[in-house]
Image: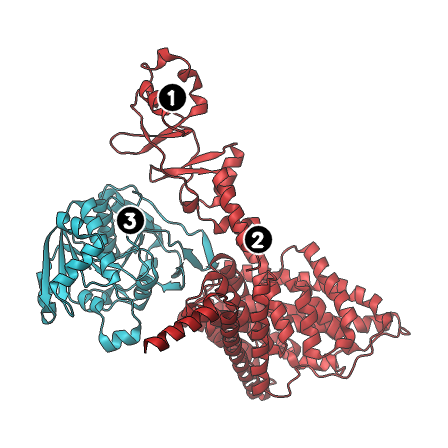
Amino acid sequence: MSKIKHFYKNLYRRLFQLDDRLLLIIAGSIAGICSGLAAVALRLSLESVLEILHPFRHYGWAFILPAVGALLSSFYLEKIAREGAGHGVPEVIYSVSRYGGILRFRSSYSRLISSFLTIGSGGSAGPEAPVVMSGSAIGSNIAKFLGLNDRQRITLVGCGTAGAIASIFNAPIAGMVFAIEVILGEWKFVNIIPIAIAAVAGAQVSHAIIPDQVIFNHLPFQVGGADILPSLGLAVVAAMVSVLFTKVLRQTGKIAKKSSLPFWARAIIGGSTVGIIGMFMPVVLAEGYHSIQSMISGTFSMGMFFVFLAVFAKIFATAMTLGWGGSGGIFAPCLVIGSLTGVLFHKMLIILVPSFGCASEGAYALLGMTGLVSGVMQAPLTGIFLIVEITGGYETILPLIVVSSISSTMSHYIEPASFYFKELIERGQFLRPGTDARILSDLNIRELIETGFVKVSENMVFRKFIELLKTSDQNFFPVIEDGTQEYKGVIQISTIRKFALDPGMYDMVFLNQIMDTNVLTASLENDLQEVLDMMDINHMDSMPVVENNRFVGMISKTRILDLYRRELIMQTSDH
Amino acid sequence: MNYKLLHIFRNTPFGRETFLQSLYFCKIINAFPVAYIPKNDKFLMYFSNDAVQVDLDHSYLTSPDTAKGHAEDLFKEMQIKPMFYEPKNYTASTLPDISTNFDYLCCPRSVSDLSSKIGLGHIGPKVRRMIKHSPFPILITSPVFKPWKSISVFFGGSKNALNALKLGLKIAISSGFGLKIYTLLEKQDKAYYKDLIQKEGLAEPVKQLSGHWHFYEKKDFNTMLYDVPHDSLIVLGAYGHGIIKDILLGSKMEQIQSTVTNNLLITGPYCSVKL
């Protein structure tokens, strides 16, 4: 028995403890499979409910369907799951950058249910962000179950994300790129392999359950060199629409938050608005994959003016859905708005230059989608790979790259933060690995404090202090009150020179007469950034740390620099 | 030392009792109480390997206009400087992150039930998870304010129980109150337990600070609980096993807390106590 135990321990140590790559690959593939299953479950259930509700859509009362869905969704999130509405991607990024990817178990299913209710009833949102949230939480909880450390947990969060995106779009490369580009924000060798394997696992799960799936079928596009110039124009338009979409989404959400209406009233108003718009323009309803399919295959029958209206209607409907209590993501709405923008641009091009031999409307819908995804998420690689994979349209790769690069660059120029990051940046919590803000936030003020300082009484006579000084190498002496032990001030060697050079003063002066009581102090509650700012403004190299009127220790720039370097090396090394 | 206790303030008569208990605890052990007045009905605590979302019932949000004033009055009543905690970080706009950089946390037996259900009921699942993951001891107060005058440590020989013993000794030192140790002889004899504390270097402080070490046979569990003075702070270690083992084997902590009305101080598996 002991031999078996010894063999098992030895094997475990060799396989996992000496090098955790194998462990991460195995755990990552489990995360990829589980998140893939979650994504497929959501996709199939959405397809079913949309099909069931489809015959009722042309009744006059059908506008209440999205309202009922949003109401149920917000009730579920508020009262049962007790989570906030929204798409959840910033929550995942926040957790990765601040808490080593720790996510609640309930997040692995709550957004799936709420987004099923929202989108299934016709709300304008996508299922991708909820599956990202779900996949990330699955990865995080697998890491928790295995007792992994922060770095390993973050990798598994990426694996869950990659598996979910790969599964829902049947696009493993896009899943991998999205996880690394948007969620983790760092291309590390140690992350890439488990995430790639998780993405493939997720896609394979999806493929096994729904065989022969290509989300958007189309005939091959004839894209030539002549399309490069119009692509530039489309990229600019897509960037403008991206910025508009981001701003409308945020503003609508802010208005809803400011309103004093209860959550259920907000959900009803948002859902009904979407329902009413959908009565006249069904393209705005649900995730919109059918509309995208018809645009790509060139069978979209709307006229130019209505396409123009549809772009704004979809933007507004998505904002009303997500801002007013519904649940879901912006990925699918981006694809719909992008393809509408592409179609609109193509129609205008044909009117303005009738003899221009450009590619088909479907190809421009594709380019528009890339432009919107890259512009809104400011994630150009995700935009390119996603569109190429979900459409199989490799012949459009060159204009795709052009549109994606220009759209993301222009959007970044006008609106420096992407939709996913904006909220975190405003809260000062967008902390990518290896950045100054992240390193400072990862350093705990408690580990920076230097302790062991000799404290002196405020009633100590100066001669006694001089005697103490002879045997000490301290430059700062905290002064405390005798009875209460409360901090009163500090004696700095540099400021008592005049007393030290005049022996006549030795028996005439007490420390409470010469101590410096105006020295700024830090507390254990301060962030390191706040402490450094205080030091910089007041030209200080060291600062006393005082908590509850008790001296705790000193914090110095030298010590901060030492630990800063250590943390920087740790965060930027490849392992 | 600058020990700090976090108390989630509830602006109700029941909340007043638990807060007074926290203030008393801090006063006795020279710690600083920090009150958090919730503005949302939930908050999140990130521990080293788990995030615990605590969903508060509506009584925690009662009369928000008077909450701070009431808390300040109670601080003054106990002659303690008022300190309040304001969350700095938010996971979502309505979900604040509460720091885990405290030395103690005060909880009622359940943070999610209505106060009418509290009394001596079960320990709520959130409190269990906090005990399981927190690096600090959790103070579970008696239903009404009840000053304690002695310390009773339940010592069963486990790692958590050793932590509980250290914590009991620490509190005995800072409070000056007497310490009693209670041991149920489940699998081992007296010599085993005495040996154990000898190995851990606790024999000397136990000898100095503890007047009595009571041993009971396994069947005398209820007698042991009855022998604990009603005005004693009970310090015990939580085993920290999962719900399945709890159902199969039962939980000592659950049995103790549902039988005695004393204040409980519980150390979980991640709690580290230094003398």
Give the Cα separation between the discs numbered 1 and 3: 41 Å
Q: Secondary structure at mark 1?
A: helix
- Give the residue drawn at x 57%, y 72%: A162
Give the Cα separation between the discs numbered 2 and 3: 45 Å
Image quarter of residue A219: bottom right
Nearest-to-viewer mark from 2 and 3: 2
Q: To which residue does mark 1 refer? A: A514
The amino acid type found where label 2 is placed reads Gly
Q: As drawn, which residue projects farthest toward the right?
A: A355
**Chain containing mark 1:** A
Badge 2 local density, few (<14 within 10 Å), some, or many (20+)? some
The amino acid type found where label 3 is placed reads His
Image quarter of residue A320: bottom right
Give the Cα separation between the discs numbered 1 and 2: 44 Å
- Res A74 visible: no
- Give the residue drawn at x 24%, y 78%: B248
Image quarter of residue A187: bottom right
Indicate whether A499 appears above or below A83.
above
